[in-house]
Amino acid sequence: MFKADMLPFWASIVPIIGGIIVPFLGSKRRHHFVAPIVTFITLLIVMAIYPHIKGGGTLETVFNTGVGFQLIFRAEMVGFFIGIIAAAVWFLASIYGVGYLSHTHAHNRYTMFSLLSFGGMLGVVFTGTLFTLYLFFELLSVASVVLVFHEETEDAMRAGYKYLIMGIFGGLVLLFSVIATYHITGTGDLSKVGFGLAGHPLLPYIFWGYIIGFGIKAGMFPVYVWLPSAHPVAPAAASALLSGVMLKAGAYGIFKTSFNIMGVDTLFPTHANIMLVLLILGLITMFLGSALAITQTEIKKMLAYSSVAQIGYIVLGLALFTSKGLTGGLMHIFAHAITKSSLFMCAGAFIHQTGLRQIKDLKGIAKRMPLTMAVFTFGGLSMIGLPPFVGFVSKWYLALGSLEIMSKGHYWSGWGIICLFMLCVSSIMNLIYYGPILIGAWFEPLPGEAPAGGGHGGHDEHDAHGHDDHAAAPAPVPNDDPGFWMMAPLLILAAAVLYFGIFTQAPLGMAAKISAMYLH
């Protein structure tokens, strides 16, 4: 029962079991630590998968349901890549939640649905059939709605309903494509459906059904409208998961659609135009998300629109269909997960400790929360794409992948220049909305504080009435950095953003290996 082949199954089921038992725990205090314990155990299970698949192999468990289909749990390199990211970030977000949610209502409800969402997320990446993929994808969608509803404010309820309605719509569209694929190919096994759709007249409709269904969860243009409403109203621990991890379930679905359900040989050259449309949608998502982020005045809403833009980078990397482009897209999944999670947790710390959420009110905040602002600075510079942070690495490979179009021949070579140009424009736009926050936080005074250098315009120590300007020392600025449970995950994520920007071998090597498996 506990042999290696069962690891993908247990990775998916342990969080669900943990979520189910939460309501039966009598003491509220116990609820605080259930999520860190369960997510840590799950992280260990996911880590145990790697030795068995690092050479390109798979782990697989098949359950016969007796009603005409099988439940297959399968771990391969790309699923492990997303799964280990999800498990690590979820563990850190759960630790953060111990501090952030300790004095909030319905803590056990949040823990329950966070763990159910976690199980749904890992079920998506460790599934072997379309039917199992659909089941876990719906579990993730439904359970995560409760995280958006959690605060129970009017805005939270409105955002939750929007997320729910769009999730139901996306699920129905996705179900159409799943049923159609089963009908045409006679199988739902993701390792076997690849060539069954080739040449079928319904292929474009099935393809876009998958893209719409997964694209809603990913937050891709034009079906991103739930995302800027949901992220600002959810608790910061949930926002970090929604943006850093759950969006990647949609990105993973788009990957599986393009490279497994359809396949390179099926899409090119016969259906190259539909992939070109996906590439253009990625560019629009990248630009529009950045443009809307610039206009925001509230920190979490700005980060939400930034997440839209970052999904554009990922979709672009998948749609380029070049080796370095796919490597860059996968690397950006990793980079965005750790970076945006840290940024949302920082925003949550600002709100939790000071009540400040408007960007204009964060001027001088580095004097009150130096460690938190240092973490936010690392994340902001990574999102801009500056070395030596991890965001630079992924954008570098996306740029190389864009230029690779000129020699690969899947698209008109001019698209490579267009993609490279848009990457540069989007990075400049990232600088426009992250730059003022960083400069204001570090170099501008706190509200009510005299500017550096004094406000008299001269060097006299006494004013016209003989008063001593230096007689009364300014009151010390309190340190409002959060306590251990919130600060520890922030520091770990900041260290990861810097470390993996310098020592790129682990994530970049894995991304390159996956790319080589699908694009020779």
Image (tube, rainbow, N blue to C red):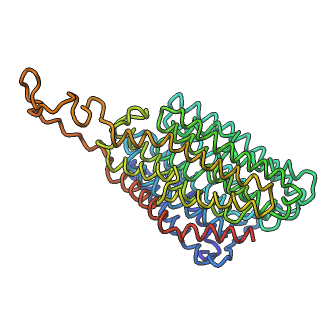
In percent of the image, x 54 and y 43: which residue is there? 147
Quarter of image, res 362: top left
Residue 395 is left or right of residue 386, and the answer is: right
Residue at 57% x, 40% y: name it.
305
Direction from residue 205 to residue 259 in the image, left or right: left
Q: Nearer the viewer, residue 178 or 71?
A: 178
Q: Which is more toward the observer, 158 or 273?
A: 273
Front residue of 101 and 255:
255
**What residue sits 93% from the left and 56% below the top?**
200
> Please, which residue is most extreme toward the top here?
465
Please say whether residue 20 is visible from this viewpoint.
Answer: no
Which quadrant does the N terminus fall into?
Answer: bottom right
Residue 23, given in percent of the width and then of the height, sits at 50, 49
Q: Quadrant of residue 321 in the image?
A: bottom right
Q: Judge by depth and name the residue closer to the eye, 75 or 411.
A: 411
The image shows residue 278, relative to residue 301, as above or below, that is below
Quadrant location of the C terminus in the rendered image: bottom right
Marker count (numbered): 0
Q: Relative to 17, does residue 44 appear above or below in the rendering? A: below
In the image, taking residue 164 as reference, residue 257 lies left or right, namely: right
Q: Give x and y (percent) for residue 512.
A: 64, 69
Q: Can residue 50 be seen from the camera position used here?
A: yes
Residue 325, percent across and down? Answer: 67, 60
Image coords of residue 168 (percent x, y):
71, 41
